[in-house]
Amino acid sequence: MKTISDLRAKFITGDYTPVDAVEEALAVIKEKDGNIHAFLDVYEDALGEAEKATKEYKEKGKDIPPLLGVPIALKNNILVKGRKATGASKILENYKAVYDATIVAKLKEAGAIIVGATNMDEFAMGGSTENSAFGPTKNPVDTERVPGGSSGGSAASVAMGAVPVAIGTDTGGSIRQPASYCGIVGFKPTYGAVSRYGLMAMGSSLDQAGPLTNTVADAELVHDIMSGLDKMDGTTIDKDTYPELPVKEKYTFGVPKHFLADGIDPDVLQAFNDHIELLKKAGHEIVDIELPLFEQGLASYYIVMPAEVSSNLARYDGIRYGHSAEGDTLLDVYEKSRAEGFGAEVKRRILLGTYVLSAGYYDAYYGKAELVRKKMREELKEVFKKVDVILTPTTPTPAFKLGEKSDPLAMYKQDIFTVPVNLTGVPALSFPMGEVERDKKSLPVGVQYIGPHGSDSKLFAIGKTIYDKRG
Ligand code: GLN
């Protein structure tokens, strides 16, 4: 298992250098990625940067940026100047980014070395990475199964041991769900904590970028580097405005039992109950909570998200960038470019979104869903007066087999525990809570710790004591 802190300690002593680390990352990719397909692009020239970083360690010793020489992988909906940014869509197959996303500029500034771009569901729409226009990614834990999605390539790149950290984006669970399926840590920040400038927009009121790592401490380190106010994204917030949330020894955890009543795999429920026992033994308090509106989360999400998707994806018109089809009229070019360039799931969501935003249906669908969303926030605020953290499993099942969920609704149901978090804008951390047996294989499953608005650092503090320090 690779961690940033181990790498950094070794870099400082000089026993192991950034050149060694990047060579190793490239070697792991070469050995395993033919089968796993976590990467859409591998940057061999990363070695040049690794040489520079190695020199810097020799010259400066300890006084160096926090990620200097650390190999990292980025989901391919994050813009890196001069590199292909495809969003795993045919429509952007040969598109190259013309600027760095704010988070990329920050990661580079901190010394991280980007070794490649990871596979994903097309424009981040999906939960298995099977919607990639360039073929699916396999789960390194069991290659018959999906790694989850949409940041499946990012999760797999960490789980296969190529990099200690990969960046994903999360609109309805796309960091936490693959983290759960691949047995690693994933973090979805408070909405506005991380700049969205230079990320391909899916659902702009829901999207956040975050880390996938092997430890909570690493996730915190990388999140701290990526987050902060950015004049290029007006929704970013100043960390100083976050509420004071004291770090305590013992916490109160709320469990929405009614919400876990059906549709959840009994083995996952068992692992979840075992995790609760572990918390009780450590002296934490567990209380039952009611979150009736959370049950409406999926229904609201699958209205709000496609509405935003339909307007965000209007920009892919065959004129400004990406694939452009021949046509007799301008409208013809639009229609053909979009028909040829987008995959089935993306088209489905554009249609759904256009429908719910249309004049006659706006109030009945979009208006209602936004109302539910507002009520969900109020409901959550009340609950957080009584508890520090809300606990749910991250996903209702372990990783499923490739091709198993051909019905879109079956796929959407995997998001039941994750979408309420995006709808309400709060942060959530997922880390492994145990394993369940399937076909004589042990598959990891994650637990989700949901905190109130702005509680990002508190979630890390709790996660570090519970997960990183586990016996
Ligand atoms: N699986 C969810 C969806 O398909 C979440 C996607 C995401 O977070 N990008 O919309």
Image: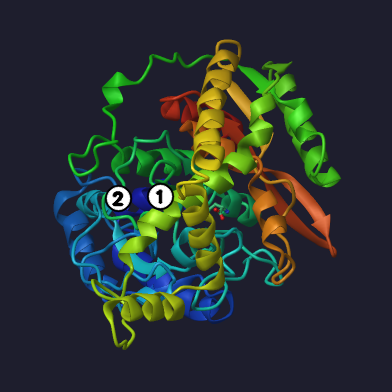
Asked whether, in this view, residue 373 is left or right of residue 390, the answer is: left
User: x%, y% of residue 254?
Assistant: 67, 21
Tag 2: residue type?
Answer: Leu
Q: Residue lying at the far top in this picture: please name it.
A: 385
User: x%, y% of residue 295?
Assistant: 69, 34
Callouts 1 and 2 close, C-beta under 8 Å = yes
Residue 121, placed above or below residue 414 = below
Work out which quarter of the rendered image holds the C terminus and state it: top right
Residue at point 17% right, 57% down?
56
Query: Which numbered tag is attached to residue 281?
Result: none
Tag 1: residue type?
Answer: Ile
Work out which quarter of the rendered image holds the N terminus and state it: bottom right
User: x%, y% of residue 450?
Assistant: 56, 30
Residue 269, placed above or below residue 55 = above
Q: How many residues crowd around disc 1 within 10 Å: few (fewer than 14), some, or many (20 or more)?
A: many
Disc 2 target residue: 67
The span from disc 1 to disc 2 (Cα, nearest Å) is 8 Å
Label 1: element kind:
helix
Residue at point 55% right, 76% down?
32
Disc 1 target residue: 4
Q: Residue lying at the far front in this picture: please name it.
A: 360
Residue 224, placed above or below residue 159 = above
Q: How many residues crowd around disc 2 within 10 Å: few (fewer than 14), some, or many (20 or more)?
A: many
